[in-house]
Image: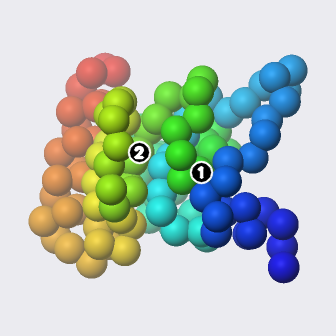
Amino acid sequence: MDKSAFLDAMNITRWRSADKPGKPFLVLHDVDADLSEQQFIENVLAQLGITPDQCDFDCEVIKGPQVVWDMRKVKRRPRVAWLVTAPLEDVVQSVAEKRQLWQQICLQREKTA
């Protein structure tokens, strides 16, 4: 079994060295899959001027990076994400979820413009 897959399945956050600079953005999710390769996620992040390479994808909040998108089923406080949606599978299948996501993207783009 892959070590990182086991840690993800157990919801164990991996240790990060303090002297290694982390990525500036964070995308939160529930699934134990590599979401950085999802075209839908790439498109949403591109609307915010962010690439997947600039993001960590994790199940828990990590101190330091800005939470860009929280797509966990159960939301936990503090809610500091720019975008807050249902899990990715639900967003992709629901027109209402996509509309809500687009509204949040527009609000975020207005803030940074």
Q: Nearer the viewer, residue 47 or 101?
A: 101
Q: Residues within 10 Å of mark 1 (few under 14, many from 20)?
A: many
Residue shown at 67%/48% (left/top)? 13
Image coordinates for residue 42, horizontal then vertical, percent: 51, 56
Q: Quadrant of residue 91?
A: bottom left
> CA separation, marks 1 and 2?
10 Å
Is residue 101 visible to us here? Answer: yes
| Drawn side of residue 10 relative to residue 78, left or right | right
Image coordinates for residue 84, horizontal then vertical, percent: 30, 46
Q: Residues within 10 Å of mark 2 (few under 14, many from 20)?
A: many
Image coordinates for residue 90, horizontal then vertical, percent: 29, 72
Amino acid at dot 1: Phe
The scheme the figure's colours follow is: rainbow
User: Which quadrant does the N terminus fall into?
Assistant: bottom right
Residue shown at 52%/68% (left/top)? 31
Give above or below for 33 relative to 107: below
Is residue 50 visible to us here? Answer: no
Residue named by callout 2: 69
Residue shown at 73%/30% (left/top)? 22
Give above or below for 83 relative to 96: above
Give above or below for 13 relative to 16: below
Amino acid at dot 2: Trp
| Drawn side of residue 90 relative to residue 55, left or right | left
**How many callouts does the rendering have?**
2
Give above or below for 85 relative to 96: above
Return the residue found at the far left: 96
Q: Nearer the viewer, residue 66 or 53?
A: 66
Residue shown at 23%/50% (left/top)? 102
Q: Quadrant of residue 109?
A: top left
Of the two numbered discs 1 and 2 on the same chain, state the one appearing first in sequence.
Answer: 1
Residue named by callout 1: 57
| Drawn side of residue 99 relative to residue 61, left or right | left
